[in-house]
Amino acid sequence: MKISCIQMDMRLGEPDWNFARAEELVRAAARTEHPDVAVLPETWNTGFFPKDLEPCADRDGERTKAVFSALARELNINIVCGSVANKRTEGFFNTAYVFDRAGEVIAEYDKTHLFTPSGEHESFLCGWHTCRFTLDGKSCGLIICYDIRFPELIRTMTLEGVDLLFAVAQWPEKRTMHLETLALARAIENQMFLVLCNSVGTAGETRCGGHSAVIDPWGEYLAKAGDREEIITGEADFSVIEGIRSSINVFRDRRPELYALDRPV
């Protein structure tokens, strides 16, 4: 599976500009990289995140679905459409959508772990389910940014059969080392491919750090970005997973009867 990460620089609170730029970059990736999957970062429609979401958020994903369903169908590629600031009846959500080659929405995910240090929980409502789907016959999962700090979430998805995890983010430059370390750890400990698509540029006073990557189950980089807007592409050979999981069988050797994950800290 050939995967292109679109490390996008969006404008805070300017959805019209961001939609046009996101479409332009997906088209560029399809034209030059010929991927099976194109991936966008977190809240690319608004940036992370404007003080006033009301005038710039999508409405139940309507605009995102209209634009990227048609684009996936036209280009004959799968699109992991990052996430968008999204308004539904209950309130605002940080929502990811996944489109298959036919333009169908095959997965929808509301971010489950909201980043309280920046007040995300004061503007958004959290989701209540994990996200698993199949792309071109491969079992995939998706998380959004802060989710990557919660290994219980990702291990749960791996035990359910995920072999490829997409992590979309707007992660700040000052904690780039954390992001890189966590992404490598999640790939290695779960013996899965991990595709990290982070953004770049500034959102208010925060500068995003980029360093998007395609990582194999050994923790090796198949592709890695710098800190500017760019498209990177890596190819995942899923035949390596069985060998890794049989030679270092952490799933056989687990002791779940010892793991009390609901103990208070």
Image (cartoon, rainbow, N blue to C red):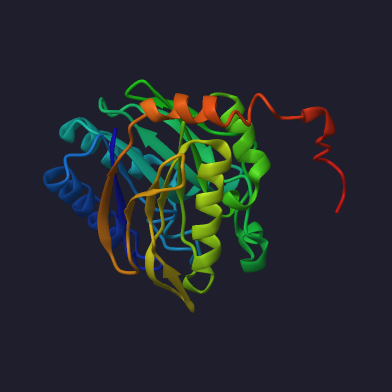
Location of the C terminus by quadrant is: bottom right
- Give the image quarter of residue 121: bottom right
Q: Nearer the viewer, residue 76 or 232?
A: 232
Is residue 122 left or right of 85 when viewed as pictured?
Answer: right
Is residue 110 left or right of 156 when viewed as pictured?
Answer: left
Res. 88 visible in picture: no
Q: Nearer the viewer, residue 221 or 128?
A: 221
- Taking the view exactly as shown, the residue that stands out farthest to the top is 137
- Residue at coordinates 23% horizontally, 33% vertically from top-left? 77
Relative to residue 199, is residue 264 depicted above or below? above
Across and down, in percent, residue 132 comes to 50, 29
- Residue at coordinates 48% horizontally, 48% vertically from top-left? 86
Res. 153 visible in picture: yes
- Taking the view exactly as shown, the residue that stands out farthest to the right is 264
Across and down, in percent, residue 136 comes to 32, 24
Location of the N terminus by quadrant is: top left
